[in-house]
């Protein structure tokens, strides 16, 4: 005999499932569609640079991403990354795209695909020449502002490139320096570069508990002081997870656990927010 006042349990479950689905649809915004592309760009005579592009459905800017460490990502033709998947700017590529920013992950060039990869190469004329070709390529593809974003040793790349290249469109529209190299016994840190010559926008992003001895928060004024002539802003973060080597991505140095705060903040600044 059916109960006229209480539907069967299966009906209640069906209603509950539909209600939860509606709640999730309201609570979780839809992620815009993204396409992933692997591109080889000719840069110097006989040399190419492999790029991994994550392209949002409605792009509004381009972020050319330079990883830290030795920078030899070993990007495969299928987009697989052989080294550095956890590096801050590499792992954040899809999150950049969710903010409407094309993420362009840069590998070491074809003539630097073995150790030491980008070590002792980041501040060379050849590295800047490679970057000029990459900037020209992505400008042609997207016709959007192009920002160079570096983390850790990648900040040495983007700063040296900006100093070597002319104003836009040949050079970048702006720089983002995350976990900047403030001292470096093996090379030239950012405060030793003639950054006072820069006139483009520069965003400095740093973790206040960065434990890497070459990126101490206490040394950040050395960099900020050199950027007085540029349109600069400094964003600092605290908290997150701090694991393992203090100069690696799972530590505060790599903004571990803070991607959902750091990347949208960078994107808002790039997009003029």
Image (cartoon, rainbow, N blue to C red):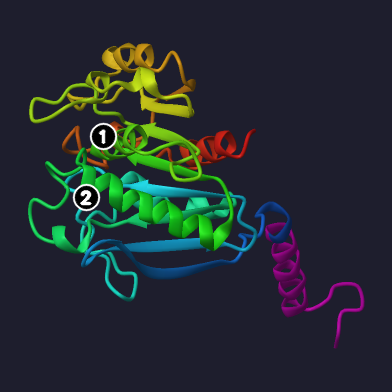
Q: Is residue 223 visible?
A: yes
Q: Residue at x 34, y 70 (%)?
A: 79
If you read the primary sequence from the N terminus, does the residue marked by circle 2 or circle 1 appear first? 2
Q: Which residue is mark 1?
A: 156
Q: Main secondary structure of the magenta part?
A: helix
- Assess disc 1: are there few (<14), some (14-19) or many (≥20) residues with their C-alpha within 10 Å of its C-alpha: many
Farthest residue to the bottom: give it. 1
Q: Is residue 167 above or below residue 199?
A: below
Label 2: which residue? Answer: 71
Residue 55: image x %, image y %?
A: 52, 62
Residue at point 45%, 15% (across, down): 229
Please tell me whether residue 23 is drawn above or below residue 131 in the rendered image.
below
Q: Mark yes or no: residue 67 visible.
A: no
Q: Residue 192 in magenta?
A: no
Highlighted range, magenta:
1-24
Spot occupied by residue 188 in the image (x, y as percentages of width and height): 17, 27
């Amino acid at each position: 005999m059916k109960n006229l006042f209480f539907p069967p349990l299966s009906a209640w479950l069906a209603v509950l499932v539909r209600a939860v689905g509606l709640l999730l649809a309201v609570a979780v915004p839809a992620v815009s569609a993204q396409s992933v592309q692997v591109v080889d760009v000719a840069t110097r005579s006989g040399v190419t640079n492999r790029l991994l592009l994550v392209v949002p459905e409605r792009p509004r800017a381009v972020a050319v991403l330079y990883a830290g460490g030795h920078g030899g990502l070993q990007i495969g033709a299928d987009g697989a990354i052989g080294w550095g998947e956890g590096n801050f700017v590499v792992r954040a590529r899809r999150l950049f795209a969710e903010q409407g920013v094309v993420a362009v992950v840069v590998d070491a060039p074809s003539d630097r695909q073995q150790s030491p990869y980008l070590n002792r190469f980041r501040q060379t004329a050849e590295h800047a020449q490679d970057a000029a070709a990459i900037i020209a390529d992505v400008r042609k593809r997207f016709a959007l502002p192009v920002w160079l974003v570096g983390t850790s040793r990648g900040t040495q790349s983007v700063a040296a490139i900006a100093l070597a290249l002319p104003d836009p469109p040949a050079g970048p529209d702006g720089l983002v320096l995350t976990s900047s190299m403030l001292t470096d016994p093996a090379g030239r840190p950012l405060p030793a570069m003639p950054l006072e010559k820069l006139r483009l926008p520069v965003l400095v992003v740093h973790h206040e508990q960065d434990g890497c001895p070459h990126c101490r928060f206490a040394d950040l004024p050395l960099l900020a002081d050199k950027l007085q002539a540029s349109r600069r802003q400094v964003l600092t973060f605290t908290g997150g997870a701090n694991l393992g080597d203090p100069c690696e991505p799972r530590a505060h140095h790599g903004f571990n656990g803070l991607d959902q705060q750091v990347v949208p903040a960078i994107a808002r600044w790039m997009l003029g927010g």
